[in-house]
Amino acid sequence: MFRNFYRWLDDRFSIGPAWEDIAVHPAPPHVNPKYSNWAFIYCLGGITFFLVVLQILTGIFLMMYYVPDVNDAYISVKYIEDTASFGSIVRGMHHWGASASLVFIFMHTLRVFYTGSYKNPRELNWIVGVLLLLVLLLFGFTGYLLPWDQKAYWATQVGVNIADSLPILGPWIKSLLVGGAGVNAMTIPRFFTIHVMILPAILMVLLVGHFLMIRRQSISGPL
Amino acid sequence: MDEKNEKQATDPQPAGEEQTPVVPQGEMSRRQFLNYTFGGVFGLIVVGMLWPVIGEAAVPALTAKPSNGSGSSLGKVSDFNEKDFKSITFQVPATEGWYQHKTTVNVYVRKDPKWTKTGGFVAISPICTHLGCLVSWEPQRNIFLCPCHGSEFDKYGRVVHPPAPRPLDYFDITVKNGQVILGADHPRNSPDEGGWG
Ligand code: HEM
Ligand code: FES
């Protein structure tokens, strides 16, 4: 049955070659665990991607209950945590996934650094990688405010005051970030918008660029 | 990549198919004119899209005013003493976008004859000058302590333990009909600035 459906699709769209182009790419021995005990370091980027996909999935489902508003943010997170079925599990996945994705993107960056993979011709992909790291850090910073509890409030206070301490532009950056003179009621929907719309859009563009460049240039050679 | 297409695009134009028009010196070719027109219209559309959205995000954020408790009464003169700070909290109306509510202002107040400029009162803001957490007065140790990164300040708000870079802000105080009235907030850059006479 599936075979027939595949043939029906292939007849019309000739997906065979397209699919091969995407999926079939022989891996060199130094990234194959059969030949090298250190092949696993080439998994770190893929693991990060998996975790980011998980963040998107769990994040979307948190949005079904979370309300980005001064009066409701805290109680809606409390509802997710204490009452909604599987809520504490989904929130737990998002909460721990946030830290795990940063741990893994950092280790992936170290792998690229120590194998010298950032060198010619892959300079541009290193830059995209640094931007991806920055975007993940901003995800963590903006997401941390959303539960609107004491830890969220004061951590954001400290974070935006670090921005404030930059010379000249600091106070502007702080005001634009928090949407007012200090962390206030307007900061929650603002951080929420950045967290669930602006950063995901930037993330997608960067990830597509990252992966296209890898396909074009293939994985870097052995040490 | 489609190789055929790529080839076509890079091949030179077959001779005779398109004649390069002769353009008099100092005049624009038809193609150039169209390119500029198209670029200009495209640019206008982009600016027309970005102008309002950036303005919407930025202007309310940059023009918002912080609320403060200037002008509020902190209590009677006889409520305060020289030895210990009294923590005064009171509510002031605050407008944050569409959200109108009361926000809590916290001031630490103590009498001190040395601070004649501020009516013999030391009124200290508890907002830590490091990164903005709230300090609290520790009577056993005679210091203000910040819970975030451990900054310490003395009974005039001067730094005795980093990372805080500057003394705590102090407030003007005036006494009217026996009431202690809060005035303007003064950030301090040097450790010896303050209400000294
Ligand atoms: C790499 C990507 C992401 C990271 C690192 C991240 C990080 C975080 C963090 C640290 C929190 C606070 C959670 C807590 O303290 O328990 C949070 C909350 C939240 N995030 Fe994300 N996030 C990511 C992606 C997303 C995406 C793509 C969405 C939605 C499309 C999303 C939606 C939410 C929502 C609705 C909350 C509030 C609920 C809560 O606090 O539990 N997140 N995020
Ligand atoms: S905010 Fe007070 S010590 Fe850092």
Image (cartoon, coloured by chain):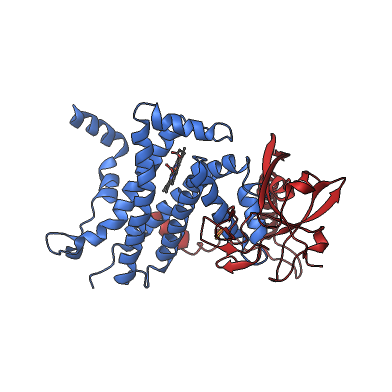
Q: Where's residue A148, x and y in %? A: 52, 40
Q: Where's residue A198, x and y in %? A: 53, 46
Left or right: residue B56 compared with residue A203:
right
Q: Is residue A113 above or below residue A34?
A: below
Left or right: residue A50 compared with residue B94:
left
Where the C terminus of chain B falls, by quadrant? bottom right
Left or right: residue A118 compared with residue A154:
left
Residue pictured at 23% horizontal, 33% vertical: A6
Residue pictured at 24% horizontal, 29% vertical: A5
Where the N terminus of chain B falls, by quadrant? bottom left
Left or right: residue B88 compared with residue A63:
right
**Depth check, front residue: A93 or B24:** A93
**Depth check, front residue: A197 or B64:** B64
Asked whether residue B114 is in view, the answer is yes
Asked whether residue B2 is in view, the answer is no
Query: For chain B, what colour was chosen?
Result: red
Tell me the quarter of the picture where residue B173 sits. Answer: bottom right
Chain identifier, blue in the render: A
Q: Is residue B33 above or below residue B97?
A: below
